Amino acid sequence: MSNRFLDLIQRGGPIVADGGMGTMLMAAGLLFGDPPELWNVLPDKQPHVRAVHRGYLDAGAQIILTNSFGGSPFRLKLHNLHGRVFELNQAAAELARAEAGDAAVVAGSIGPSGELFEPMGALTYDAAVAGFAAQAAGLAAGGADVLWVETMSDLQEVRAAVAGARQAAPQLPIAATMTFDTRGFTMMGVSPAQAVAELGELGLAAFGGNCGNGTAEIEGVIFGMSQAGASAPLIAKSNAGLPEMIDGQAVYNGTPAIMAEYARRVRALGATIIGACCGSSPAHVRAIAQALHTLPPLELAGIELASAPAQRQSPEATRRARDDRRARRSA
């Protein structure tokens, strides 16, 4: 059976993904701390969610992510909504599908749990798999073409999310991105090279990096992953620069022109699927699409990175990976 996401990849890149959802909804009135996923089922708020999707599609996005980043039971329980996981995720996918039709790919966004795994925290692997499976089931029922695990810092959590997604919707491909925001490592000490080695074992349709500390960092991540021999198409979804607090609000300094140049650079560095993340808007995605589809590609030899990509594991990550391997062998 044909799948829109796999068909899009097979046609070749570059592929344009969308930009941020949360910052767009906040501009539409979402209050800080409120769950954006609830807007998927509120009749007076649904048009705002669809408008964000429509804006990105009109800007040239070929992939749009659902409004479900915090749609796991772990995040929804903070708002006493953990009993509505299936409903809220299904609605998220249905809203995106209504705008995308058959013309674009709907990616079911699955963000991190916000919890720590044992022994550092209370979350068990089995509980994580079950929670992510519940979210994935709703996204699949709503019409998602691909399940999109994103903004992860812990490889164990990526494995749990992928296992849950595969359990709930074995017919759908899965993509995953990690966020590298600590000198080229994730918060849990994972380097781009380690991510390539371990994500490559999960049978993902695509993987890469998102969010982080701006375009220069994502460029290093993509180059590091490419140099490590990534076995799947690479995804780059950078924040629109770095935020500054102005009048109590986070304002990002990445202009559409900056994001257009970033798009050309990460394409040359090895990315196939290119979009934006926090702080971005349809104007940023339009600039990305125009740069990728109308300007000549850059040559890799002419690109200088702001810093060398982190290719080795940090000592903490080495210890965690060793302990994790031992635990899996014991199980």
Image (cartoon, rainbow, N blue to C red):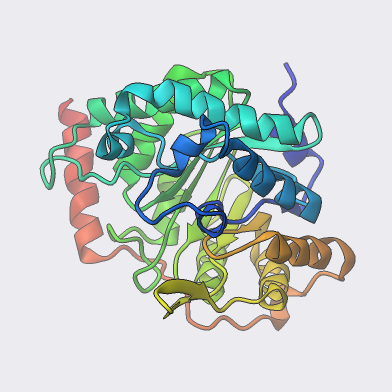
Can residue 201 be spotted in the picture? no
Left or right, 281 with reference to 41: right
Closest to the observer, 120 or 87: 87
Would you identify the image quadrant in which residue 19 lies? bottom right
Would you identify the image quadrant in which residue 49 lies? top right
| Residue shown at the point (32%, 30%) measured from the top left | 81
Can residue 43 be spotted in the picture? yes
Residue 183 to residue 322: above or below? below
Where residue 315 sits: x, y (%)? 21, 64
Would you identify the image quadrant in which residue 257 lies? bottom right
Left or right, 111 with reference to 98: left
**Given the current orientation, which residue lies at the most extreme front position?**
44
Residue 172 to residue 75: above or below? above
Q: How many marks?
A: 0
The C terminus lies in quadrant: top left
**Given the current orientation, which residue lies at the most extreme left position?**
119
| Residue shown at the point (37%, 29%) measured from the top left | 132
| Residue shown at the point (44%, 59%) measured from the top left | 193
Residue 292 to residue 206: above or below? below
Residue 215 to residue 138: above or below? below
Where residue 312 sits: x, y (%)? 35, 66
Where residue 121 sits: x, y (%)? 13, 44
Where residue 260 sits: x, y (%)? 72, 71
Closest to the observer, 109 or 186: 109
Closest to the observer, 111 or 67: 67
| Residue shown at the point (46%, 22%) measured from the top left | 87
The N terminus lies in quadrant: top right
